[in-house]
Amino acid sequence: MGLVVQKYGGSSVADAEGIKRVAKRIVEAKKNGNQVVVVVSAMGDTTDELIDLAEQVSPMPAGREFDMLLTAGERISMALLAMAIKNLGHEAQSFTGSQAGVITDSVHNKARIIDVTPGRIRDSLDKGNIAIVAGFQGVSADKKDITTLGRGGSDTTAVALAAALDAEVCEIYTDVDGVFTADPRVVKKAKKIDWISFEDMLELAASGSKILLHRCVEYARRYNIPIHVRSSFSGLQGTWVSSEPIEQGDKKVEQAIISGVAHDTSEAKITVVGVPDKPGEAAAIFRTIADAEINIDMVVQNVSAASTGLTDISFTLPKTEGRKAIDALEKNRPGIGFDSLRYDDQIGKISLVGAGMKTNPGVTASFFEALSDAGVNIELISTSEIRISVVTRKDDVPEAVRAVHTAFGLDSDTDEAVVYGGTGR
Ligand code: ASP
Ligand code: MG
């Protein structure tokens, strides 16, 4: 008998109908002879609504009580799902993250899982139950406080449980049919990917693809847990994310040269203007940013004008950290020495990802040509072995993504990308 972990996202359990539909699917998996563990997210936009509510009573809600509040969302859906399953004549028990043995550090609102001790889940399975676990939450090892794993954290819960229970597969059910070569909300002709390596999936996630969180893929790669991303609204095969290509018929799916195009409009750009071109300047700027605990993404330094000996340094960072970064730099301006700061939150990033670019010349040239043909101006460039990213004006992003997708022959002949649910919030 196999053990499967299934995770259902908020849009799959958005209302009573959704919960009943999902319950049927879960019962099917059980009837096929599997032990089934289900991880569930909060219904629909519940988490956002709870955040709105918190902001109405306190300007910047955070910490222990905020986590206590947000975890309520998943407790609602887990209990309702267990009831719906019982109504279909099968036994189910729901567990909070803490009851399921999800142990985290004590960083509220973005805790990391440090251990999983799923004793109660095992017992429940051994008694023939379907175990339902609230996603996105755990309990801190030291203070025994309830924590959350950061937005979208239920996927990580699912993979962590799959690893701890030695599951055959972690199935992630969502509102699209799998991982696509671009966001189907932007590119109608995006194609479903049958198989993608952990490496390419990590780069896509790091580049703004929202289908799977970086942390979740990282966890799956570390414990070598195959992920099957698929829709809870259709019966189609989805996308396998794993270390080895899957078999299709009697042959292996080939590694694509280019896996896909990702985009990200959640970043801003800060330019430090008039920095003396001498050793130690970049160090001073980025030490200031690091001390403020801000993660940065791209960095470029312009050539300094010989006459002034001054240069500009630009970097990108999450918009949400913009204010903090500006304040930190201003505070240290006397020590660092620069003329002024420029803040720009109207940028977007477009990335092309694929392990095949290591061995195929001309990928970078074709990427830039596609952008140029679409009349898109490039502001920053950064690359890794298997990724090229550019920063452009935010308004240019949809057009740029479509142009690059077409240029690399990724368009499908049919409009296969269906978005079944979700409000995209
Ligand atoms: N409900 C949480 C959120 O919306 C966790 C999740 O959906 O994975 O971020
Ligand atoms: Mg959610």
Image (cartoon, rainbow, N blue to C red):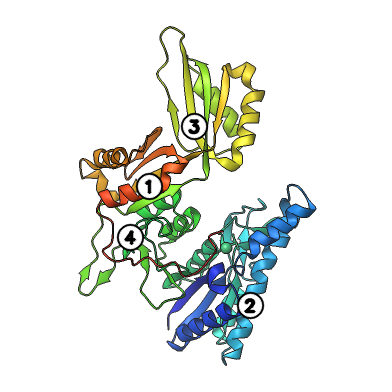
Q: Which residue is mark 1?
A: 399
Residue 242 percent location from the top left of the image: 36, 62
- Tag 1 secondary structure: helix
- Mark 2 Cβ inside 8 Å of ligand 1: no
Which three-letter amino acid code belongs to the residue tagged 1? Glu
Percent across and percent down for residue 320 are 60, 42
Confirm if mark 3 falls within 8 A of ligand 1. Answer: no
Amino acid type for the residue under numbered disc 2: Ser
Query: Image quadrant for the N terminus?
Result: bottom left
The span from disc 1 to disc 2 (Cα, nearest Å) is 45 Å
Residue 415's disc is none
Task: Residue at 20%, 74% (x, y): give it.
Answer: 250
Ligand 2 quarter of the rendering: bottom right
For the C terminus, the quadrant is bottom right
Q: Which residue is rendered at x = 28% and y = 62% of the image?
A: 412
Neighbours of disc 2 within 10 Å: few (<14), some (14-19), many (20+): many
The foreground one among 272 and 414 is 414
Say which quarter of the image contains residue 115.
bottom right
Provide the residue designation for mark 3: 315
How far apart marks 4 and 2 lie (CA) works out to 40 Å
Mark 4 or 3 closer to N-term? 4
Mark 1 residue crowding within 10 angstroms, few (<14) / some (14–19) / many (20+): some
Q: Secondary structure at mark 4?
A: loop
- The residue wearing badge 4 is 189
The numbered disc on residue 94 is 2
Q: Amino acid at mark 4?
A: Lys
Crowding at dot 3, Cα within 10 Å, few <14 / some 14-19 / many 20+, comes out as some
Q: Is disc 4 in contact with disc 2, using a CB cutoff of under 8 Å? A: no
Pointer 4 or 2: first along the chain: 2
